[in-house]
Image (tube, grey):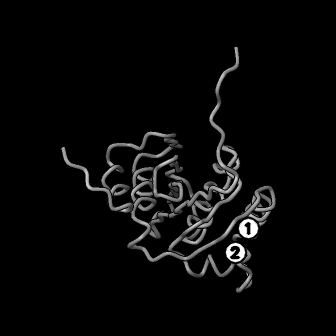
């Protein structure tokens, strides 16, 4: 018996919004990411919270690294990474010299980038990064590592629906 299997189209680009959260008083932070397809439909999200971060930039760059790793794990070949850190996007795109504190993480990101067919780093204003911001807040508050695959958590649903302009009537 032949079993049918769904295969992702090779041209489909996954958009991953990334966000870091950091408290300067404690040095504790977290980071989250949300992956969606070209139509804005949720694929997966995740994050890690209550980790020591020396700066907000470290939390932000960690969110990019973990978002890319999640895409590699799922076999996505074409990825757009969006973050609201213009400074980080310029470093990732080679427009600014990198800071010494994040060189190792940037090396990991470049290695991951080379494993994928296409990776693009984009700046997005904070207002358009709300879903990733909510994930970063949640994991930073709860601690630990979290992953949601195919089904988004209830507290994230409305933000995702607003992002794709879907009207949901209950």
Taking the image as shown, residue 7 lies to the left or right of residue 22, namely: right
Taking the image as shown, residue 80 lies to the left or right of residue 45, namely: right
Can you say which quadrant of the picture contains the N terminus? top right
Image spot of residue 165 (x, y percent): 33, 62
> Is 156 rendered above or below residue 96?
above
Residue, far top: 1
Asked if marks 2 and 1 touch (Cβ < 8 Å), the reply is yes
Report the residue marked by disc 2: 92
Residue 5, picture quadrant: top right
167 or 83: nearer the viewer: 167
- The residue that appears at 32% across and 48% down in the rendered structure is 155
Q: Secondary structure at mark 1?
A: helix
Task: Report how far apart the C-alphas of labels 2 and 1 lie in the structure.
Answer: 8 Å
Q: Secondary structure at mark 2?
A: helix
- The residue that appears at 63% across and 55% down in the rendered structure is 12
149 or 37: nearer the viewer: 37
Image spot of residue 130 (x, y percent): 39, 64
99 or 111: nearer the viewer: 111
42 or 148: nearer the viewer: 42
Report the residue marked by disc 1: 106
């Amino acid at each position: 018996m032949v079993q049918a299997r769904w295969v992702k189209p090779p041209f489909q680009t996954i958009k991953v919004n990334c966000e870091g959260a950091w408290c300067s008083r404690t040095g504790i932070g977290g980071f989250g990411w949300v992956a969606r397809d070209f139509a804005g439909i949720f694929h997966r999200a995740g994050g890690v919270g209550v980790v020591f971060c020396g700066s907000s930039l470290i939390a932000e760059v960690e969110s990019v690294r973990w978002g890319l790793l999640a895409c590699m794990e799922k076999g996505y070949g074409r990825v757009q990474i969006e973050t609201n850190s213009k400074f980080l996007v310029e470093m990732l795109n080679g427009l600014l010299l990198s800071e010494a504190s994040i060189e190792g993480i940037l090396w990991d990101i470049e290695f991951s980038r080379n494993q994928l067919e296409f990776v693009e780093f984009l700046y997005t204003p904070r207002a358009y990064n709300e879903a990733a911001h909510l994930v970063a807040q949640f994991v930073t508050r709860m601690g630990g590592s979290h992953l949601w695959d195919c089904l988004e958590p209830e507290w994230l649903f409305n933000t995702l629906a607003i992002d794709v302009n879907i009207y949901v009537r209950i």
